[in-house]
Image (spheres, helix red, strand yellow):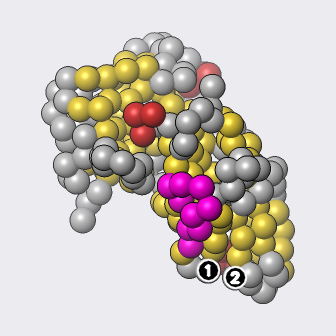
Amino acid sequence: NAGVTQTPKFRILKIGQSMTLQCAQDMNHNYMYWYRQDPGMGLKLIYYSVGAGITDKGEVPNGYNVSRSTTEDFPLRLELAAPSQTSVYFCASSYPMTGANTEAFFGQGTRLTVV
Amino acid sequence: GNSVTQMEGPVTLSEEAFLTINCTYTATGYPSLFWYVQYPGEGLQLLLKATKADDKGSNKGFEATYRKETTSFHLEKGSVQVSDSAVYFCALSDEGNKLVFGAGTILRVKS
């Protein structure tokens, strides 16, 4: 069972560079999320998607873009990297269940440093 | 908006000590509540959950009870082990199943 797979695991970017963080899930989940984890700050929601072709902003979307062309994939794009985007990024997925909330499954994380 | 507040760490305990990590929440409606655990170098994984008031979630010796009257979901374990050393996150699930996390509490257990 692969679950949620994120690539790369580590990356160093120079200020102004761009990159795409990849996320794929093989559980046929409708919902997918991107969070960033800063030291001592918990996790903040960047973007989320409730299904293919549908995305929406979370709490901290500035400087990021997403797309959801398939159920499986939810890439996160950084267009002009800034030092403030140095963080650990987690992708997660879950599925809606009528009458109850379900758990989210997380990837292993991508540690990004912008210098 | 919805928010989660949990006790600051790190919490340092000796093996077999009793653990409590406090968590309180602010939310509209009736959210589900979760505890996630993050071991070093890994992603988050669900530890336990409760979906309605007075529910008790339990797993691996950990327990937490959904207290609507005090808006709390404190995590407890009767006897911690070194292998429990990790970061623990309290979270709630709002409309749309979006998870709102607390800041996390580092737990260190010494042998």
User: Which one is earlier in the sequence, the residue at label 2 or at label 1?
Assistant: 1
Question: Residue at the spot x=64%, y=71% of the render?
Answer: B63
User: Residue B54 magenta-drawn?
Assistant: yes
Question: Residue at the spot x=54%, y=75% of the render?
Answer: B59
- Mark 2 Cα-neighbour bin, 10 Å: few <14, some 14–19, many ≥20: some
Label 2 sits on residue: B81
Q: Amino acid at mark 2?
A: Gln
Percent of width and height locating residue B3: 66, 35
Q: Secondary structure at mark 2?
A: loop
Quadrant of the image for the C terminus of chain A?
A: top right
Give residue B55's quadrant in the image.
Answer: bottom right
Q: Amino acid at mark 1?
A: Gly
Q: Chain of mark 1?
A: B
Question: Residue at the spot x=72%, y=60% of the render?
Answer: B74
Residue A42 marker: none
Magenta-highlighted residues: B50-58
Give residue B80's quadrant in the image.
Answer: bottom right
User: Residue A57 magenta-drawn?
Assistant: no
Label 1 sits on residue: B61
**Can residue B38 be seen in this snapshot?**
no
Q: CA distance from mark 2 to mark 1?
A: 11 Å
Q: Is residue B43 left or right of residue B7?
A: left
Percent of width and height locating residue A94: 34, 47
Q: Chain of mark 2?
A: B
Q: Is residue A99 left or right of residue A42?
A: left
Q: Secondary structure at mark 1?
A: loop
Percent of width and height locating residue A13: 48, 27
- Mark 1 Cα-neighbour bin, 10 Å: few <14, some 14–19, many ≥20: few
